[in-house]
């Protein structure tokens, strides 16, 4: 997570006291009152959808023997990932180790360097509740969680132990804290017995209600819930998605995020029920962030950005900003060889397209950006197109 500096107020207090004594010659008690904190504080959060690693992706990232480099994928969008206080995405692959053999769909197992690149790009938190989290069994899941931690990132949605399953994870900055919960509709038919049920958070209304109640006991400023759900490749939320979202709203969720459909779906505002925000929102699906799915609606999506402000005197919080940044995933040959590169919308806006773009690349990127803007503009008037850097 991004850090801030601490002002050395103790030194300043001593200095003021010393000067007062010298000038008056008669020491008087000096009571140092620290400057009143700014009544408004804020935290910024950005979220993307599914982070996948198909076999072609690690083939393109291969350098030699067991060496891979995925970092160039993010070179055009890294500055946007580094900006917010928290950048979050859904890790839809397993980091099970080379001993299991690297593989793409349908049973993912990606090189360790795939996580290296996410940390390098600026990710802070990864959702790990999704249908591929058990692709390499319990051992693969546990190794994935350990590797996430070693890269300095956090995870939510899968658990190493029963005790961790019962733990509500809190994150925060600048005096604002939020609880983060994550659940998946399933794990592709890979079942967990009673002894291992704690490993993955499933969408279970009894459990969701219990988790939200326990989160509320910790007095967070807001509760954010992530669902991995929906019908793949659909651009509108299903009845099931709407039902689960309504349940979460009715039990106190402030913000709801989603993915799994591999397509971007609408963002909608709602009136919270027992939440701290007056108006919350749901992003039904944030589509793909990186993958080898090259067809329309799946080869690009958007970064969703929002900020929360808090009046430190009254404790009241508000949703201050809600914006989106379209992006498109390039796949092709560059001066560096075969590559995947995520291009943000400003690449087209500033007409800074590289020479290696083919006419088909330009057509696909333009189409993707237009599709993203079209569905987002139909969502809610509060959702604005993010200005280019």
Image (tube, rainbow, N blue to C red):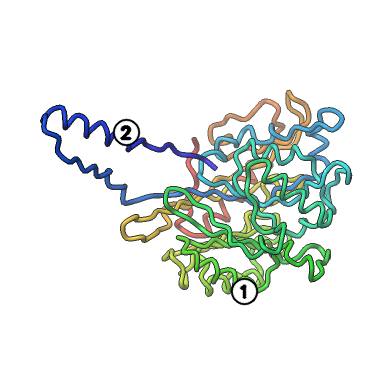
Residue at the (60%, 39%) spot, across then down: 122
Residue nearest the observer in this picture, 35 or 49: 35
Residue at the (65%, 50%) spot, across then down: 126
SS for dot 1: helix
Q: Residues within 10 Å of mark 2 (few under 14, many from 20)?
A: few
Residue 186 horizontal/vertical position (percent) = 75, 65
Q: Is residue 283 visible?
A: yes
Q: On the image, which quarter does residue 187 sit in? A: bottom right
Residue at the (32%, 33%) spot, across then down: 11
Residue at the (80%, 38%) spot, across then down: 58
Residue 264 horizontal/vertical position (percent) = 63, 55
Q: How far apart are marks 1 and 2 (CA)?
A: 56 Å
Q: Which residue carries the number 1 mark?
A: 243
Q: Which of marks 1 and 2 is nearer the N terminus?
A: 2
Q: On the image, which quarter does residue 346 sit in? A: top right
Q: Which residue carries the number 2 mark?
A: 11
Q: On the image, which quarter does residue 200 sit in? A: bottom right
Q: Nearer the viewer, mark 1 or mark 2?
A: 2
Mark linked to residue 17: none
Residue nearest the observer in this picture, 230 or 90: 90
167 with respect to 64 (left or right):
left
């Amino acid at each position: 997570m991004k850090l801030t500096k601490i002002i050395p107020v103790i030194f300043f207090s001593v200095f003021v006291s010393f000067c007062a004594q010298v000038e008056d010659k008669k020491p008087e008690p000096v009571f140092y009152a620290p400057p009143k904190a700014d009544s408004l504080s804020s935290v910024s959060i950005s979220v993307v959808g599914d982070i996948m690693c198909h076999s072609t992706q690690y083939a393109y990232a291969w350098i030699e023997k067991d060496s891979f480099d995925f970092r160039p994928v993010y070179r055009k969008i890294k500055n946007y990932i580094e900006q917010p206080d928290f950048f979050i995405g859904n890790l839809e692959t397993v980091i099970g180790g080379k001993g299991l053999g690297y593989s793409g769909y349908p049973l993912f197992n990606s090189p360790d360097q795939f996580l290296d690149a996410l940390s390098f790009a600026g990710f802070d938190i990864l959702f790990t509740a999704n249908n591929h989290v058990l692709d390499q069994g319990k051992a693969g899941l546990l190794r994935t969680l350990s590797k996430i931690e070693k890269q300095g990132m956090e995870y939510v949605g899968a658990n190493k132990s029963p005790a961790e399953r019962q733990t509500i994870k809190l994150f925060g900055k600048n005096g604002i804290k939020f609880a983060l919960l994550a659940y998946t509709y399933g794990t592709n038919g890979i079942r967990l017995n009673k002894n291992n049920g704690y490993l993955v958070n499933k969408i279970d209304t009894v459990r969701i209600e219990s988790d939200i109640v326990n989160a509320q006991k910790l007095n967070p400023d807001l509760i954010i819930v992530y669902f991995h759900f929906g019908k793949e490749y659909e651009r509108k939320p299903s009845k099931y998605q709407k039902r689960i979202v309504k349940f979460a709203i009715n039990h106190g969720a402030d913000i709801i995020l989603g993915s799994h459909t591999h397509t971007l779906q609408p963002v909608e505002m709602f009136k919270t029920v027992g939440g701290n925000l007056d108006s919350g929102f749901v992003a039904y699906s944030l589509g793909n962030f990186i993958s080898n799915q090259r067809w329309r609606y799946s080869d690009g999506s958007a970064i969703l950005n929002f900020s929360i402000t808090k009046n430190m005197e009254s404790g009241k919080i508000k949703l201050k900003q809600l914006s989106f940044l379209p992006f498109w995933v390039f796949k092709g040959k560059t001066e560096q060889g075969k590559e995947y590169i995520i291009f943000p919308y400003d690449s087209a806006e500033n007409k800074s397209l590289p020479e290696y773009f083919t006419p088909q690349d330009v057509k696909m990127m333009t189409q993707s950006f237009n599709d993203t803007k079209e569905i987002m503009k139909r969502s809610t008037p509060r959702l604005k197109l993010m200005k280019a850097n």
